[in-house]
Image (tube, rainbow, N blue to C red):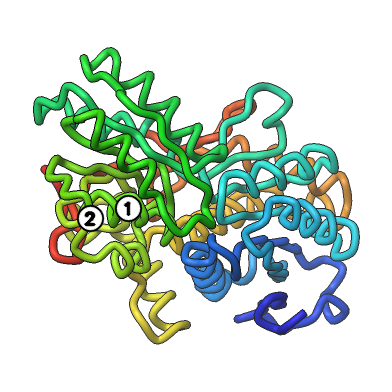
Amino acid sequence: MSTFLRSLVGLTLAAGLASMASAADLKVGFVTSLSGPGSSIGIPYAKGIQAAAAFKGEVGGRKIQLIQLDDASDPSTAARNARKLIDEEKVDVLIGTSGVPGSMAIAAVARESKTPMIGITPLSFAGEDGAWTVTVAQPVPLMVGAVVESMKRSGIKAVAYIGFSDSWGDLVYDALLKSAEPAGIKVVTNERYARADSSVAGQVLKIVAARPDAVITGGSGTPGALPYLALAERGFKGPIYGTHALINPDFIRVSGASAQGLLAPTGPVIIAEQLPANNPIRKMTMDFRAAYQKLHSVPTTDAFSAYAFDAWLVLADAAARVGAKTEPGTPQYRTALRDAIVSTKELVGTHGVYNFKPGVTAGADERARVVVKLDKGQWQLVP
C-alpha cells in the first residue's frame, strides 16, 4: 500500500510512526476516500484534517497522532479500515469518511467496539445505535428545508428528484418529501443512479417528461454533476437545486455551465467574508484558512476540508475536558472521551456552533446553514 494511501500524519508532532509514539499519546484513526468515485471530496477531507493537526497538535500536554487510511470509496473497506485502526493501531477515536454509506459502516464498528466516532458526513441514529457517534455535518432535513423554503418563495409547485441509489440519496429524498408537502410542492419523480455511473440520460428523459417546475439532486462530488450535464443537454431551463454535498471545486469544474444558477445550502464557511466582523464563525474560518494555506500553500475553496477541521476541533475540545483522568489507549479513556464529546456546548467551528447531547447524532443548528447560488463558477450568498 502506497504512502499516499496510508499515511501516518504527524505534522507538528515529534512522534511520527506508531512505534515511536508515547503510551500517553492520543491516537486518532481517520478514514477517507483518497481513491474511487468519492475521492473528489475525500481528498479535501484529508487536507482539512492535516491542517487541523498542524493547527492543534497537542492537548493538555498530550500529543495527537493521526493515522489515515484510504477506503477507496467502498463501505466494506471503510469498515475493515475502522477495525484495523482499533485492533492494530489502538486508536482512541475514529473520524470519517467521505460518503454516508461508508460512514454508517464505520459507525457500526465504533458501536460494536465502544470507540467514539466523529462523522464528517450527515448521519442520524436513534438511541443506542448512535451512542458512540456524532457528526459535524449539518442534518439533511435542516439543509433541504432551506432549499424548499427558497423554492416556495420562487413559486415552485412541482419538483423532480434525482439522486444516488444509496443511503445518501435516500436521506435527501426523504427530507425533501417531508419539507415539500407542507410547502405545497409536489415531488414528481424519484430517479436514482449509482456513484460510478457514467450516464443518467434515461433518468433525465423521465424527468423532462414529468414537466417539473424545477429539479433537485441528491448527489455529491464529481458524480453529482451528471444530472446537471444531462439536463442541459436536454434543454431544461427551469431552476436547479442541490445540497451541501456539491460545494467543491471539482463539481464546479465538471458541471461547467450546466450548473449555472444552481441554488444549494452550505455552511457559512463558504461565505465567511460576508459575515459580520464580530461573528465567531468568521474568526474561526479565518484561522482555518490560514492553517490550510500555511500547510498546503494554496487557499481552501471547498466545504469538505472544513468539516474535517471541525471534527478535529470537537475532538480537541473533548480531550481537553477529559484531561489526565485516564490514559489514552484504554477502554476507560474511550468512554470518558465519548462522554466528553456528547456533552460539547457552544463550540465554535467553521460550519457552525456545535452542541451535542447523548442520543442525538448531529450538533449543528440554524447557524450552520446559508443558501448560495453558483454564478460563473463562484458561490454567492443568497439574501
Q: Residue at x 67, y 31 (%)?
A: 130
Where in the figure is residue 358, as x and y percent of width and height?
63, 28
Where in the figure is residue 380, as x and y percent of width and height?
16, 56
At label 1, the amino acid type is Ile
Viewer-nearest of discs 1 and 2:
2
Question: For the residue carrying disc 1, how many other residues have a C-alpha within 10 Å: few (<14), some (14-19), or many (20+)?
Answer: many
Q: Left or right: 30 with respect to 240?
A: right
Residue 74 position (above or below residue 353) = below
In-front residue for pair 122/349: 122
Quadrant in the picture for residue 226: bottom left
At label 2, the amino acid type is Glu
In-front residue for pair 53/200: 200
Q: Is residue 255 visible?
A: yes
Where in the figure is residue 245, as x and y percent of width and height?
40, 50
In-front residue for pair 185/139: 185
Residue 266 position (above or below residue 85) = above
Quadrant in the picture for residue 289: bottom left
Q: Left or right: 15 with respect to 291?
A: right
Residue 356 position (above or below residue 274) = above
Q: Which mark is residue 281?
A: 1
Question: For the residue carrying disc 2, how many other residues have a C-alpha within 10 Å: few (<14), some (14-19), or many (20+)?
Answer: few
Q: Quadrant of the N terminus?
A: bottom right
User: Which of pointers 1 and 2 lies earlier in the amino acid sequence?
Assistant: 2
Q: Left or right: 109 with respect to 317?
A: right
Q: Which residue is mark 2?
A: 233
Q: Quadrant of the C terminus?
A: top left
The mark tally for this picture is: 2
Q: Secondary structure at mark 2?
A: helix
Q: Residue at x 48, y 45 (%)?
A: 193
